[in-house]
Structure formats: structure tokens, C-alpha cells
Image (cartoon, rainbow, N blue to C red):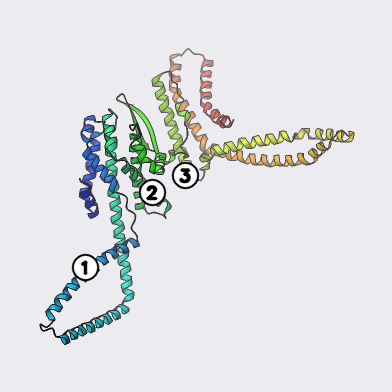
Amino acid sequence: ALEPELQDAIAGGDEVTMEGAIRGFLMLADATRGPNHANQLSIAQPALFDLMDRLFAKMFHQDKPTMETLWRQRGEASATQQATEKVLKFKESADSEGEMAPKAGNENSRRTLLTVRQVSMSRQQTLAGLVKSESAKSQDAQHAAADRLELAQMIELSRWRNNIRARLKIAATTCILAVVEGGESQIIPHKVLTTLQWTGIAEQMNSCYQSLKKQQAGAEEDAEDLKERAQLFEEGILYCFCLKYMVAYDEDNQYILPAIKPHRQAMKYFSHHTGYVEIVRDKRLERLFFQLPDACLPGGPLDQPFVEMYDTDRSEVNRKNLQFIDNLVRLIKKEEHNSLIRASRLAFCVTRWGAICKATFWLSLLIHLLLICSSYSPEWLQLRVEQRFAERVEAGLATEAEAIFHDSVTPVSRHVAFALSGLLLLLCLVRAVAFCVGALPNILRVALEVQGGAEPEEVIEEEENSEASSPGRFLKKAQRGCSAAAPLLRFLISPFVRCM
């Protein structure tokens, strides 16, 4: 197995060996793409999958070293060194006592020797204490600087190890996806499904997820840490691609679902960032997974149905495809314009457009209900209503409820209606600004494109039908103007239609 050699290369900083292993996996992936069914069958061997299993089972992300890590490693090293020194000193003392001891075993000479040793050791300790007390501050500063330097070296080494581990596992996962690409036969996917240990892949995905959570909950990160975060995300989402792709072949739910079950949060997180599409290639239906941009995530600015993209004439295939591409290009230009607005101070013109439209609609509805329920009368009828009410009071026909409603409810409802009308006017102004900034440029651009695209055909028709009368030309120009104004009318009416 190559896994121990790769682990030793990572621990020893052997970049040449690791680059060779990474390029080997990527070369195998390139050889199977296309898909190349013969190469897929040749590469899908148990020995390769066993190596991947060992990599996924033993290579995990290393946390960032701290000063405590440095002190702990120093303590372990110093304890080992002290034990070794004690053993050596014991052997040396035993040998020296054996040489210096008299053959007759004179007790007085032995005691004298021990006294001399004790005196010399006490003198050495006293001198060492004096030197230490004099240069304690300078030594502490030197030790602190050495600690910081050593910690920086440890952080750099751990960053390189994490980088090389992630690149190796990304290359191995890319190789797995390339081997099962295409789905030309069921042999290779079932071989991969039954040979690989999917629990190791799920654990690696969860490890990436936990590391990302720690970085998100931590303090501000520098540029290199952000680079590691992007690499962690790439590694984790590739594991998610593998699990999502192979779950369709696990008909009895024996491999994939039991591996995912302990790590549902990690799978949910990466699935949230995963897009899915089906394509037909060489008369085969293939599933493709890809990473969604941040703007396309659920709740993002591009998380919209985009129904206008499918507004095409489906009577002819070629015309449908051309119109589909034209609609797609228009949507891209529209989103490019909206992205510029989102980056400015007028971002609310795009991000809050739907909320502004709904607010104006419901506020106007509330005002109308208030006016209806409070029997509001316009200013030109106000005098007549007051005279009629006074006549009823004089004739004794007005009830107590009518008097309370006239004296208490009507004035309050009138003031409230005025206040809400002022608020509605303010919202309408905001909506007008948002419309002019966000939507009007797109509408004008689409109208000009439609008008400009229709002109050549109409010119040709006019040249061919030179006998056409001037009223016919006028009708064509009117029709062109109406078609250019149609998007504007549709845009103005659509918010009210949606709210209804």
C-alpha cells in the first residue's frame, strides 16, 4: 500500500512525492473522461479503491497550531530528553565510582569523595542562580521571540500539510467521478459502489463541514486562511457529488444512506450549494452536479423562476431555440445591470422591489377599506351630507349611534386616511425612483433591441412590396411601436396581477 509512504512524505515535507501522487490521480481522471469506457474498465480496480479508502480513512484536516501546542510538544520532547540524560548520568556515575573506589574498600576515602562532589554541585548551582538573576529579562525576551518564530514555522508547515492533503483527496475524488462518468453500463458504478468504503467519504465530508463551521465562528481570517476555506469547500462538495451520484445505484440502500445518516447536517449544507441537471449525450441520459454560485442559492438574488426565459414560439424547433437564446441573453444583460445597482447605495431599487410593490398595493387597499367602512364622503359632497345630518337631528330622526359615528368615528377616520395617503404618496415616490433606476433601463433596452431586430425584416418586406400604400406603412409603424411598448405595459401591470 502506498498510503504509509504518502503519510511519511507529508510529515517530512516531501513535495516531489506528493505532487507525483496528485498528478497520477488527475492523469487517471483525464484518461477516463469522454467518457472512455475501455479506460474506465481498466482503471476501476480494487487496488486503486483500496488506496483511496486508506487515504479517506486516515488523512484529516489538521487544526491551526497554537502556543499551547508548541509547549505541549516541547514538554514531551524535554521529558524524553530528561529521561535519556538520567540514564546516561547513572551509567557514567556508576562507571566513575567503580574506577575511583579503592580496592580495599576504604570507607573514609569514599565519604571524602562524596563530600567533594556535593560541595562542587552546590557551588555550580549558586553560580547558575546568580547568572540567571542578572540576565533573566534578556533571556525571557529571547525565549519569547524564539517561541513566536517557532510557532510561525509550525503554522506554515501545518498549512502546507493541509493544502497537500486536500489536493490529494480532491484528485482522488475527481478520479472517482471520472470513472463513473457517462453511465454507459451498470458494471462500473456497481463495482465502485460495492468496493469503496463510503463511511470514510462521508466522514471526510463531515470533517470539512466542521472545519468550515469553526472558521465561520472564529475571528477574522487572513488571505491564506480564506484560501484554505475555499479548498475545504471544494473538497467537501466533491464528496457530496460522489454520494449524490452513487445513491441512484444503491437500490437497496445498503451503502450510501447508512453512511450519510450520522452526518446529515454536513450533507444538507453541501446539498444546499449543489446544482443538478440532466443532459443527453450519445443517446444516454447523464446526471451532472455542479456548485451553485452564491447569487443562485435559495434566497439569493437569482433564486427566481425566470418564466420569461421560456416565452418562446414552440411551433418550430429552430425558432424556439433562437428565441430561447435571445431570452437568455436578455436575462444575462438584465442581471448584469442589476448587479451594478446592488453594489451601489441604491441597492434597494432591485433587492426590495417586490416588497415595495406589495407595500403600495396593501396600503392602498387598506385606505380604500377604511374609506368604505367609515362612510367617507368627498369634499364636494361634504356640505350636503352635513346639511342632511343636521335636518335629521332637528327632526329627531337621528339615532344615538349615528351621532356617535358622526362626532367621533368620522373625524378620526378622516385624519387616519390623510396620514395613510401621505404614507402611500411617499411609497409611490420610492417606487417611482426604484422603477426608474432598476427597471426602466432594462425595459428601454429590450424595446430598442426588439425594434432594432425587427427593422431589417420590415425593410425587406417594404422593398419587396413596393406597391404597398402609405396607410399600410403607417399600420406597420404603429404595430412596431405597440410591440416596443408591450414590455413596459406588462411590467407595470404584473405586480398588481401577482398580488391579486
Label 2, residues with CA under 10 Å away: few <14, some 14-19, many ≥20: some
**Which label sits on residue 362?**
none
Three-letter code for the amino acid on which mark 3 is drawn: Ala
Tell me the residue that label 3 is attached to. 343
Is residue 392 something one can see in this rendering?
yes
Q: 48 or 227: nearer the eye?
A: 48
Three-letter code for the amino acid on which mark 2 is drawn: Gln
Tell me the residue that label 2 is attached to. 210
Residue 294: image location, x then y, percent: 42, 41
Residue lying furthest right: 395
Tell me the residue that label 1 is attached to. 84
Q: Residue 401's quadrant in the figure? A: top right
Q: 187 left or right of 342?
A: left
Tag 3 secondary structure: loop
Tag 2 secondary structure: helix
Is residue 292 something one can see in this rendering?
no
Residue lying furthest bottom: 108
Q: Is residue 263 above or below residue 96?
A: above
Three-letter code for the amino acid on which mark 1 is drawn: Thr
The C terminus lies in quadrant: top right
Residue 1: image location, x then y, percent: 20, 45
